[in-house]
Image: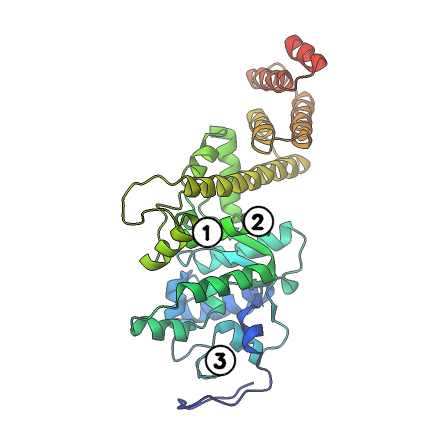
Amino acid sequence: PGWTWLKPSRALPVPPAMSTPEESEVLGLSVAYMVSTFLEEVKKEFGEDADPNYYEVNKRMLYSDSAKGRHLVCPRDRREGCSYVDAVHMSEKGHTAPATIMLSWSWHYTVKTVVFALARWCRVNGKDPAEVFVWQCALCNNQFRVEENKAKGQWESFDTFKALFEKRMDHTNHIVSLMAPWDEPVNIKRIWCVFEKHMAVVKGHKFDVILPEEEDARFQKALEEGGMQPVWELFSKVDIQSAEATSATDKKNILHLVDPDLDLDAAGVYSKKCSKLNAEVVSRLQQWFVRLAEQSLLERSERREPIHLQAWANVAFLLETVRGSEENWDKATNMYHRAMEVAKADGETETKQYAFLLVKYASHLSRSGSQNHREQADFL
């Protein structure tokens, strides 16, 4: 810790606190450190109210003469200049450990968007931020090597990148995708992000979505005002064939993995295998957004916040259709019951909104296949 180095002409000796190359590749940074120290460093570098994106942070904090890892040896190649997370590991104990989650995100997001969303995810899921260690490419890849290679016009081979990507994914077994804004998220338009979600489905890894607090509020408002339509419009934007990539070679390689028979030079060619991948990703996103809608609505009800009756009906319908199973049909039924209880308690049973709720509930019952439920539906 604290060692500084001259520019080396050979491999450097190993500091005592350095991890092995294998450990370094899956090292994560704690959310608690991001919320405290990292945000403070950003404030000192950019100003009190600044909120730079990670391209800006990279230039001034991750790949610069003043970067935390500039004069420390990298455990992966024994050369001067290491990743942010390796620098923290070597100089500040207790803030790094093998990553517990892998973040799927975009460099276009700002620091506060990312850090506050991660902190909120910890709070909502009852996790200690000091015990959640994030693998985030900006902070965990060695940006000195990335920039050196870019200056030479060199790119890490796709096979090497894919192998490391799968290693980190398999190690954490938990992908957390940051989506902002909720109805136009940047990362569903990036091919690696879409591929990450696909691989999480294929490998059976745990998959969560993070919404920043203000985006969650917008999502809830959209459910009340626009029903299910905004949700369906979001999912229609997932298309791996039209997704963007920094490297054209990466895009070709990913599409070739998905569909080896696809003519990559022909424009607008339909691929059944790519379409299947899109459907798998959409299905997982649908399930998550419906769970979010359900949880948020119940939490708002517990806090006695005013909720439009249409929102209850919309979420119940989403539960029934998107997550179709007997368990979710029961959850949808309970959602209608909760809505009717709230309406009665608030004296809203003589309103058009309550009539709308009953019509939706009747339609729900009629789809159950039960004679008793059909009779109830006819009565309603």
Q: How many marks?
A: 3
Rounded to the nearest whole Å, what is the CA distance between mark 3 and mark 1?
29 Å
Marks 1 & 2, CB-CB < 8 Å contact: no
Earlier along the polypeptide chain: callout 3 or callout 2? 3
**SS under mark 3:** loop
Query: Is residue 322 positioned above or below 103 on the image?
Result: above
- Picture coordinates of residue 91, whole percent (x, y): 56, 80
Query: Is residue 340 positioned above or below 174 on the image?
Result: above
Label 3, on which residue? 74
> Which label belongs to residue 50?
none
Choose between 365 and 212: the one closer to the eye: 365
- Picture coordinates of residue 118, whole percent (x, y): 56, 56
- Picture coordinates of residue 325, whole percent (x, y): 64, 31
Earlier along the polypeptide chain: callout 1 or callout 2? 1
Tag 3: amino acid: Cys
Name the residue rendered at 65%, 51% in the picture: 125
Rounded to the nearest whole Å, what is the CA distance between mark 1 and mark 2?
15 Å
Q: Residues within 10 Å of mark 2 (few under 14, many from 20)?
A: many
Q: Residues within 10 Å of mark 1 (few under 14, many from 20)?
A: many
Earlier along the polypeptide chain: callout 3 or callout 1? 3
**SS under mark 2:** strand
Label 1, on which residue? 195
Could you say which quadrant of the image residue 57 lies in? bottom left
Rounded to the nearest whole Å, what is the CA distance between mark 3 and mark 2?
31 Å
Marks 3 & 2, CB-CB < 8 Å contact: no
Tag 1: amino acid: Phe
Name the residue rendered at 55%, 25% in the picture: 310
Q: Tell me, yes or no, if residue 154 can be seen here.
A: yes
The label nearer to you, 1 versus 2, is 1
Choose between 220 and 260: the one closer to the eye: 260
Name the residue rendered at 50%, 39% in the picture: 219
